[in-house]
Amino acid sequence: MRFVDAHTHLEFFALKGLPIEKAKSKKDLISMIESAERKPVVAYGWSEDILGETIERKDIDKFPFPVLLMRVDAHIGVINKKVMEELQLNPSEKFDPEKGYVYEEVLWEITSMLKPKEIGWALIKGQEEALSKEIVEIHDFVDSKIAETYFRLREEGNLKLRVALMPFYKDYENVLRLFDKYGEDDFLKLGWIKIFVDGSIGARTAYLKEPYRDKASRGILLKTEEELINIIKELEAKNLRVAIHAIGDGAIDVVLNAFEKADIKLKEHRIEHAEMIDSYQAKRVKDMGIVLCIQPNFNPVFMQTYIKALGEDRARRMNPLKMLDEMGVNMIFGSDMMPFDPEVGLKYASQILGQEKALYYYTGLKHKG
Ligand SMILES: [Zn+2]
């Protein structure tokens, strides 16, 4: 097979020094941190489903060095006292000092401060993993530092994977400058500009129309409609397309309204995930020539989380591959690293759509009309 994984974060390999995703209990996890060689400890991949319970700051406060443990969905992290002392964070909806939980932008900022500075080795490791899974192309989300590392790997002749760089909005101009300096070729292309509009179901930060089942909240909206309209216009004026992260049904509405009011001229803007999309929203997506980047692996991996957070009814309507396919919505599939293995999504999508169609969506974007 020659897969295209249209949603990846190879930089996560830089956080995989400590394989906390393999910890079967909190005790396991704590002893991994005790024997960690690299400090500060920044690690990715825990989940309360596997640990059997959630992890909080009181579990890791005893360590005299900074510890940040990112949950598998990358939308919550838990930090210890040492990190709090060093950063002097103010409590907010994105920082819970009691539990030591940090969410969304606060989490990303702490991660980028604590993560290893040199990540070329991690990208190489990710590339090896990709090639071993017959992935030939990825769409990888990057800041300008990661982008620069990709250009360096290419100069050194070490890039063997086709990569579309997907710059985060806050840093996209610097990434454009790198393309001006080093140039595009078959291996490194500029993709879509990434914007976050909400969080995730697992973190209860996806922005919903109705509250969560187990939390009196509708999640967090990270950008208003007006802000989005301005960003979309700004980027379209430079002939750039957006890839907007929107998971909750409320967030998807905000995005669709923004596309409509921005009066988009370009086809093939993207929405990433669109997990809670309904048929009315799907129709609008199709009419505006928008592409959905869907993670078919999410239903098999996260259904228990969905049911807990949303209840059976909403959970069963998540990631509606069949409906989207039948409506002729333009889709591409990507793993979002959960796990970084197209076989997981392919297996599920094949059950729903048949193998031929499932493969079709795993081989990259088809341009329609
Ligand atoms: Zn992602």
Image (tube, rainbow, N blue to C red):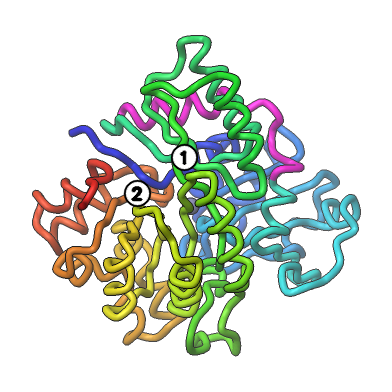
Location of mark 1 (residue)? 140
User: Can I make out residue 240 in this image?
Assistant: yes
Residue placed at 50% from the left, 66% from the top? 262
Residue placed at 9% from the left, 49% from the top? 356
Residue placed at 82% from the left, 54% from the top? 62
The part of the image, by quadrant, that contains residue 171 is top right
x, y percentage for residue 289? 31, 60
Q: Earlier in the sequence, mark 1 or mark 2?
A: 1
Kind of residue at disc 1: Asp
> Magenta residues: mostly which secondary structure?
helix
x, y percentage for residue 352? 15, 64
Magenta residues?
A: 112-132
The part of the image, by quadrant, that contains residue 287 is bottom left
User: Can I make out residue 316 in this image?
Assistant: no
Q: Is residue 177 above or below residue 263?
A: above
Residue 334 disc label: 2
